[in-house]
Image: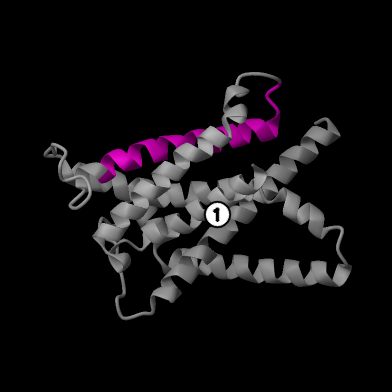
Amino acid sequence: MKKARVIIDFAMMMMLIMLMAYSLIGETLHEIVGTLIFALFIVHHIINRKWTSALFKGKDKPVRIFQTVINAMIFIVMMLQPVSGILLSKHLFTFLPMLNITPQARTIHMLLSYWGFVLMSIHAGTHLSPIFNKLKKQKKGLQIIVYTIAAIWVVYGCYAFFKRDIPIYMFMRSMFVYFDFSEPRVCFFLDYISAAVPFMILGLIIVKKLTKRKIDGV
C-alpha cells in the first residue's frame, strides 16, 4: 500500500507538469490527463482514508496542522479544477450542457492551475523526510554529493520559476500564458520539474522544523 501511494503521488506530480504544458501537448490530451489526475486524486484519498477519518481525532500537532491546511487547500483546488475544466471542454465533455461563463471559468482554471502546482509541490515535499533520514545513515561523501545537487537544483528551480513567469500567472498579472513552440518540449518539462523542487524542499524544511519543535517541547 505504501508503494502504491508513492507511485500514485509521483504519477500525479508528473501529470500535473504535463497539464502545465497546455498548448504544447494539445487540448485533447490536456483534457484526458486532467481527467486521469482527478481519478488518481480520488484513488489517493481512498488509500489515505485512515488519515482523513482521523482528521479530528487526537492532538493538533504543529506538523499535522500544517499538513491539514495544505491538504485542505489542495482539495479545494482539485474540486474546482475539474468543474472549470469541464466548462471549458471542447472534446471530452461536449455532451454536457454548457453555461455561458467561459471567461470566468478560464480565469479560475488558470489561477488554480498555478497555485495548485505550488501547493502540490509543497505537499510532495512534506513526504520527503524518510528519504533524507535514510541519507543521514549513508557515507559522508554521498551526503555531500546529494546535498550539493539538491542545492544547485533549488537555485536553478528558483530561476526557472521566474523564467517561466509563474508568479505573473499566479497573481493574474497576465491572462495569457506564453508558450515557445520552437523550444524542445523537454526543456519546458525540465524547467517545471525544477521549479517544483524549491517548494518541495520548503515543504520538507517546514515539516522538519515543526517536528523539531514538537521534540523540543516548544
Residue 107 point in image, percent of width and height: 26, 47
Q: Residue 10 appears in which quarter of the rendering? A: bottom right
Asked whether residue 95 is in view, the answer is yes
Residue 21 point in image, percent of width and height: 36, 63
72 vs 209: above or below: above
- State the quadrant of the N terminus: top right
Seen at 72% across and 49% down, the residue is: 129
- State the quadrant of the C terminus: top right
Q: Which residue is mark 1?
A: 10
Image-based side of 121 in relation to 141, left or right? left
The residue range painted magenta reads: 59-85
Asked whether residue 171 is in view, the answer is no
42 vs 138: above or below: above
Q: Residue 151 appears in which quarter of the rendering? A: bottom right
Image-based side of 47 in relation to 143, left or right? left
- Asked if residue 143 lies in the magenta stretch, the reply is no
**Disc 1 residue type?**
Phe
178 vs 62: above or below: below
Front-lying residue, 174 or 68: 68
**Please, which residue is most extreme toward the top here?**
57
Residue 47 point in image, percent of width and height: 57, 36
Please identify the dominant SS of the magenta region.
Answer: helix
- Asked if residue 65 lies in the magenta stretch, the reply is yes
Residue 92 point in image, percent of width and height: 22, 49
